Each structure stands twice: as structure tokens, then as C-alpha cells.
Amino acid sequence: MQYRDERDALRGRVEGLEEQLAAAKKELDERRDDDRAARVEQIERQMAEARRVLDQLGRELDAVRGRPKRSLAVPLLVAAGVLAGAAIAAMLLGRSASQATYVPPPPMAPTVAPTPSPTPQPPPEPEPPSPASPPPEVPMRTASATWKATVTRATGLPLAPGAACTVEAKLASPGHHVDVSELQVLCGGKPIYHSTDPLNGMSMFRSSVEEDSGSSPGTYLYAISYEDKGDRAGSRAEISLDSIRKVGAVWSDSAPAYRVELKLPYQSAPVRGEPLLDATSRSLRRSARVTGATGPSPVKAGARCMLRASPLARAGKCLTRLECGGRMIYGEGTTGVSECTVESDQVVRVHDGNTTPNGGDPAFALDLATGKVSVRDETKSGAWTISVQLDPTG
């Protein structure tokens, strides 16, 4: 009786499932869901288990009734169909329940890749500046200057005091300074120093040259300071020369050793040609006359004069000479360096406020604008003054 009730319940359930299966098939025709593969596999396993249970119940029922064993094909097919329908129905019902509230999202607009902005390019490298052209080579101005000297003392050479010597210098200038490119000293016609002789040792060398306008137009005078000293074993002797101090010496410690001391003039013999220095080209050269004199002055009114004022390489300094009546009134010997003003490449003012006791030469004043020159001094004989007027043309 128990088996009958169970079977009847199972059949009722099958009938209910058949109704659900019919509805599920209809919906299945309308919809397909390949994504339920996992669920289908699960239901199939449940159906296989249901078939096994149903078959076992049928055999037990037949045994109770005393019937022969029946074929399992029909019940199995029925159970399979029922269970398959139940499985499909369950799948579709579950799908319907889940899809009842599912709203598919709106289709997404196609993604448009943003247009890449162009990569900023660095500004082009500026063209490298062209290498500066070398400055044009400045032509060198050259001159040869000579000083007549005499021997004051000599050892190691047969030169008596008073023997004649000559200092010869080759000068070169780019315009703003003067170099000594070659120098030699000859005594008795034989060289005792030559700057081109081989040097085997060391040399401490220096030189400087001052240029001055000569008394005659187109002539120039030079003062020199020159040294070439140092331990050596070659044929080149050593020398120290200063025409501003009017002294010089040449010596050699190599055998045969000798030493010659010299006396030479402050300035060289006049050299005719063009000036070596640009500053000298701005020299003032004017003729003049004495318009008045007081005290024991060296000249009297009416004497003719020649004025020369040459700018030096030292800024604001001039070498000035005033010669009147054949006498050097201002700038005699190594004196005459004074303050001066150059305007428009022309000496326009010269001033020296010290008299001989204080500065070695008379006080001197020149004003080119008025053309007036005044000289005064204080001597043992008394104070004196000279007034000079420049000629309208030099």
C-alpha cells in the first residue's frame, strides 16, 4: 500500500510537470539561453537519480503483486521525458524569474579614441655664431736709433777711458708702444754685446723707449732703457742701459771675462721719418717769440723760440721743450715731463707748477687757446719770468 501511494504521488507530480513542460517548451522555442549549460547539467543528474528511484519503486511494486518483471524501457522513457520536461521547466521558470526585473543596458556608444595632440617640438637650435675674424694685422712701424757713447771704465778689454762706443737699436711699434727688436754695442769697432748672440742660460729682459719730436720738423728723438741679465755660459754678454740716467754697462762672466762702463746721451741722434707712436703724431710744435722778461732771465724780449710738446704713453703726461735764443729754457736734459691735456688729438694745455729748487726745472704754463706761454723760476741770482706768444702758424 505504501508503494502504491508513493507511485501515485509520483505520477501526480509527473502530470503537473507535464503541464509545466508544455508551457516551458513554448517559451523555449521563443528564447534560447546557452548560458544555462551548467544548470542543464545539474538537472540531468537529478533526472538520472529520479529514473533510478522510479524504476526501483516499480520493481518492488511488481514483486508485491507477484507479476513478472517488466521492461524498463517504457517507464524509463516516460520518467526521462517527465524529468526532462521538469528540468526544462525549472530552468525556464528560473530564467523568467531572473529576467522579469532585468533590463538590458543601452548599447554603449562606440569609444572614439581622442585625437592625440601633436607633440610640441622644441624650437630649432640657433645657428652657432660664426667665429670672429681675426683682427687685421697691424703693420709695424720701424726705425733705427743711435747713441754716441764713451767708455768711463773698462776691465778685461783693451779700452781706455774716453774710447768711443756706439749703441745701435732697431725699434718697432704697432702705434701704442715701442719694442726693441735688436740691440748691439760696439766699442773700437768691435761688438761687445749683441742681442742676437746665442744664449746658453737665462735672461731677465726688459726694455722701454720714449719718443720725442726733434727740433727739426719730421725728426724724432728716442730715450731708451734696456736690460738683458742672468746667469749664462754662452757668447751673449749681459747689459744694463739707461739713457735717461745717461749710464750703461756691458759685462761677461764667461772667460775671457770683461766689464765696460759707458756714458751716453739722454736722447738718440735725430731720426728722420714718421713717428713710431700715435701719441707723438699729436705733438704740438709751434714757433714763438719772447714778449716780455723780468729779473735775471736767460733771454730778453724779442728772442725767437721753438715750442715742442709730445704726449707720452703715460696718460696725462707730456714731454715739453721750450728753446729760445739758442738756449733751452724749459725741458733741458732729462727734465720737461709735465701734466698736459690733449683734446681732439692736439695738446691744448701744459702745466708744471714747481720751480727748479722743487722740481728740477722752471715752472711752466701753456694755454693753446690764447697762444700764451709763461715761464718762471727762482735761482741764486733771483726770481725771473718770461712771457712768450705763439705765432699764429707753426
Image (spheres, rainbow, N blue to C red):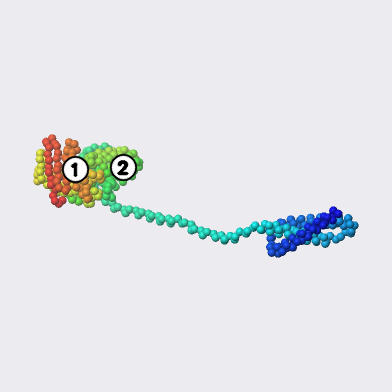
Q: In the displayed image of the protein, which residue is found farthest to the top?
A: 380
2 and 1 marks in contact (CB < 8 Å): no
Q: Is residue 263 above or below residue 22?
A: above
Question: What is the quadrant of residue 234 in the picture?
Answer: top left
Q: Is residue 123 above or below residue 178?
A: below
In this picture, residue 137 sits left or right of residue 92? left
Instruction: Give the amino acid at mark 2.
Output: Phe
Viewer-side residue, 83 vs 380: 83
User: How many labels were placed on the picture?
Assistant: 2
Mark 2 / mark 1, whichever is N-terminal:
2
Q: Quadrant of the N terminus?
A: bottom right
Residue 358 at what x, y percent from top left? 18, 36
Residue 106 at what x, y percent from top left? 60, 60
Q: CA distance from mark 2 to mark 1?
A: 35 Å
> Within 10 Å of the Cα at label 2, are there few (<14), some (14-19), or many (20+) other Cα atoms?
few
Mark 1 — residue? 351
Question: What is the quadrant of residue 320 in the picture?
Answer: top left
* Label 1: which secondary element: strand
Residue 271 at what x, y percent from top left? 21, 49
Q: Is residue 103 above or below residue 318?
A: below
Mark 2 — residue? 205
In this picture, residue 76 sits left or right of residue 340? right
Question: What is the quadrant of residue 337 in the picture?
Answer: top left
In this picture, residue 78 sits left or right of residue 316? right
Q: Is residue 183 above or below residue 87?
A: above
Q: Look at 18% across and 49% down and name the residue there.
A: 285
Looking at the image, is mark 2 or mark 1 nearer the viewer? 1
Residue 160 at what x, y percent from top left? 22, 38
Whether residue 89 is visible, yes or no, is yes
* Label 2: which secondary element: strand
Q: Look at 90% across and 57% down and name the residue there.
A: 66
In this picture, residue 40 sits left or right of residue 315? right
